[in-house]
Amino acid sequence: MDTISIEASSKSYPVFIGRGIITQLKQMLNSSFKGLTKIMIITDETVAEIHPHALISQLEDFHYTVFIVPSGEKAKTFEVYYSALTAALEAKLDRKSLVLAFGGGAVGDLGGFVAATFMRGISFIQIPTTILAHDSAVGGKVAINHPLGKNMIGAFYQPEAVFYDLEFLDSLPITEKRSGYAEVIKHALIQDQDFYQWLLFNISDLEAATNDQLALALKKGIKIKGNIVAQDEKENGIRAFLNFGHTLGHAIEAEMGYGKITHGEAVMIGMVFALQLSIDLAGLSFNLKEFLNWIHRLGYKTEVPSHLKAESLIEKMEQDKKTIGSSINFVLLEQLGKPRMKQIDKAILLEYLT
């Protein structure tokens, strides 16, 4: 087991990462949550079917209730959020209660937002079950979606801990592995050129990646995000760099309908777009052809889905929470590991999208 400490300005907490580390949860609950009254597990239909006993076996000595939500982005709606709060009230949770967000990034976002708003905030622990959640489970961004934009209703609310048991990743389908690795690649591009080179030359088949390679990549990504969050918890500055590829990626997700394309695959399209803009508008020296060949081998699509209209994507990007006024802010790279924010005229973006 490895422990990575996240040092946010509002709270410090551990990320436990390794195979089988869920067996350490009971010990932490007994030692760190004196007076714990009840536990609410928020999980989705898929995780509830595949991994129920691994978590439940740690909770035999506690009063707990389970709230099951739809899988994927369908969990992050007003209706599901409201139902979760109703379930918490009916189960008589109080300020000494605890939420366990047990699932992928969508469950973590929903569970964290429920915890942040129930009785003005109760404790929660992230227990991610996907590669993608190595990014979303760390840093305290919790939210639900609105039809006009992703993660528009939310809060900054840090967990008490993250238990990242890599055994949960063994059952992931290739689409989920691909979605998660997009965020790993993002971390490398914005922060660590050596890490990018390691990925480029060692990860040529996502299904053939070894446990050691996966663990190394995830730990590296978590440390990169943790370092950024430590400097800027509430995205007043450099934390915005973590949105590399997300401005267009979120627009694609919203236009297609949440869940029609995975988050990571949409972000990868957004990163390719941002890399081309970086080369043309920010002076980035980068072998884009090599990058495209690599990610195509990994199974990513890099074109904006043909049925989406450029004008509609521009409208969605204007509504993005990273946009200020009428300018559209993009995270670009001046060089690998050196991002910057740039306001880009809508006409230029429209030309590139077209």
Image (cartoon, rainbow, N blue to C red):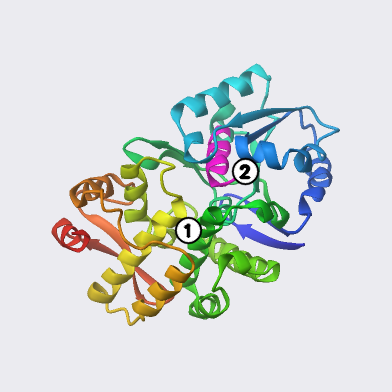
Name the amino acid, label 2: Gly
Earlier residue among tags 1 and 2: 2
Where's the N terminus, which quadrant?
A: bottom right
Name the amino acid, label 1: Asp
Residue 346 visible in rendering: yes
Disc 1 to disc 2, C-alpha distance = 26 Å
Nearer to us of marks 1 and 2 is: 2
Where's the C terminus, which quadrant?
A: bottom left
The residue lying furthest to the left in this view is: 347
Q: Is residue 195 left or right of residue 244?
A: right
Q: Position of residue 302 (x, y in %)?
A: 35, 63
**Label 2 Cα neighbours within 10 Å, binned few <14 / some 14-19 / many ≥20:** many
Q: Is residue 184 left or right of residue 316?
A: right
Q: Is residue 112 magenta?
A: yes
Residue 44 visible in rendering: no
Q: Position of residue 40 (x, y in %)?
A: 68, 30
Residue under numbered circle 2: 103
* Residue at horizontal 68 percent and vertical 29 percent from the top: 66
* Residue at horizontal 55 percent and vertical 66 percent from the top: 224
Q: Nearer the viewer, residue 36 or 274?
A: 274
Question: Where does the magenta region start and end?
Answer: 104-114
Q: How many marks?
A: 2
Majority secondary structure of magenta residues? helix
Where is 84 relative to 106, above or below? above
Secondary structure, mark 2, is strand
**Label 1 Cα neighbours within 10 Å, binned few <14 / some 14-19 / many ≥20:** some
Q: Position of residue 132 (x, y in %)?
A: 54, 54
Secondary structure, mark 1, is loop
Residue under numbered circle 1: 232
